[in-house]
């Protein structure tokens, strides 16, 4: 008599395809994760780091901030690598004087810069003797306490005459600091290191859909006071170049950390700066 295998045993599937199924699920998960990150960074919040001292005293070299992408609308510059998927600028919003903005810097339109909005369309902007003038009126500029900036691996003094020592012996830079108040009442601090050629400029009227942008470190910033020439300035910036508005300080480091010394990841952090808003 011949034995017959049970039906359920004959129909049991081979388990060989299970590892492939897991790999497929992981690949799908990875694609979804990448899409979520791209969408979030393109349309909501995106991180930016500060690589220079042009926005002292508000921003230090080594600061990492989050920029809100929605206040000024969206363009191709909102997308990774400036992929030209958005025609022009959609849902456009008008910046306000005093906003700190991230934008693609002319003339190449391929590098992220961060500056403060000084002039809006129709404004006449001029520097006279180191004082900002908007529409023919001087912007109030009040001398306040010097800005004390500790010297660290990513921060140095602009000129030797500003070097100093604290009572505890720590090396610092002491920069002349002023409080500027724009029309409308918005105030912020600027540095003025002395008279320089950019302290006296010809009057410029900001064209439609454009902005006049300046760094708060007035004597160490290549901004709209200079023509849009590589290495010289950015000229008048089209609003289409806007990427986002500085919103919150995410992290800050003095540059002293080392990958092989994990404890320095914490000692290098400027903890008091984290969480500050703009």
Image (tube, rainbow, N blue to C red):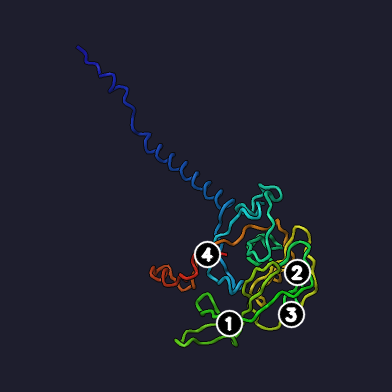
| Nearest-to-viewer mark from 3 and 1 | 1
Image disc number at residue 249: 4
Picture disc at residue 180: none
Distance from disc 2 to disc 1, alpha carbons, whole Å, reads 33 Å
Mark 1 lies on a secondary structure that is strand
Q: Which circle's residue, 3 or 1, is located before the other in the chain?
A: 1
* Rendered position, 33 above or below 204: above
Q: Where, quadrant-wise, is the C terminus in this rendering?
A: bottom right
The answer to whether the residues at label 4 and label 1 have Cβ atoms under 8 Å apart is no
> In this view of the protein, which residue sits in the foreground, 238 or 147?
147
Q: Is residue 205 left or right of residue 156?
A: right
Q: Judge from the rendering whether residue 56 lies leftward or rightward of residue 209; answer left or right.
A: left
Residue 227, label in figure: 2
**How far apart are the two marked residues, 2 and 3, measured between alpha carbons?**
14 Å
Q: CA distance from mark 2 to mark 4?
A: 30 Å
Q: Secondary structure at mark 4?
A: strand
Label 2 secondary element: loop
Q: Give the mark, 2 or 1, whose residue is nearer the N terminus.
A: 1
Residues packed near mark 2 inside 10 Å, few (<14), some (14 to 19) or many (20 plus): some
> Disc count in the image?
4
The residue labelled by disc 1 is 145
Nearest to the observer: residue 63 or residue 153:
63
The earlier-in-sequence mark between 3 and 4 is 3
Residue 78 image point, x, y percent: 63, 53
Question: Picture quarter containing residue 1?
Answer: top left
| Residue 143, image x, y percentages | 64, 81
Please identify, in this view, whether the residue under mark 2 or under mark 3 is nearer the observer. 3
Q: CA distance from mark 3 to mark 4?
A: 33 Å
In the image: residue 229, left or right of residue 261: right
Which residue is located at x 73 percent, y 66 percent?
119
Question: What residue did someone put label 3 on?
Answer: 197
């Amino acid at each position: 008599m011949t034995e017959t295998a049970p039906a359920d045993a004959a129909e049991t599937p081979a388990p060989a395809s299970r590892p492939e199924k897991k790999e497929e699920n992981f690949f799908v998960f990875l694609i979804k994760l990448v899409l979520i990150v791209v969408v979030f960074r393109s349309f909501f919040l995106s991180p930016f780091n500060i690589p220079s001292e042009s926005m002292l005293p508000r921003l230090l070299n080594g600061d990492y901030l989050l920029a809100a992408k929605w206040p000024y609308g969206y363009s191709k510059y909102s997308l990774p690598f400036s992929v030209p998927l958005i025609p022009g600028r959609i849902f456009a919003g008008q910046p306000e004087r005093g906003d700190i903005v991230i934008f693609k810097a002319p003339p190449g339109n391929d590098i992220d810069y961060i500056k403060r909005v000084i002039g809006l369309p129709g404004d006449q902007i001029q520097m006279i003797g180191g004082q900002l003038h908007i529409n023919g009126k001087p912007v109030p500029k009040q001398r306040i306490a010097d800005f004390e900036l500790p010297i660290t691996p990513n921060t140095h003094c602009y000129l030797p005459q500003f070097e100093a020592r604290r009572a505890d012996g720590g090396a610092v830079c002491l920069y002349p600091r002023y409080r500027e108040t724009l029309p409308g009442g918005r105030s912020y601090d600027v540095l003025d290191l002395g008279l320089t050629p950019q302290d006296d400029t010809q009057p410029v009227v900001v064209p439609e859909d454009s902005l006049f942008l300046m760094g708060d470190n007035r004597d160490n910033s290549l901004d709209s006071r200079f023509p849009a020439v590589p290495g010289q300035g950015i000229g008048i910036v089209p609003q289409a170049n806007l990427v986002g508005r500085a919103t919150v300080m995410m992290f800050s480091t003095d540059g002293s950390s080392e990958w092989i010394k994990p404890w320095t990841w914490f000692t290098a952090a400027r903890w008091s700066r984290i969480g500050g808003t703009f």
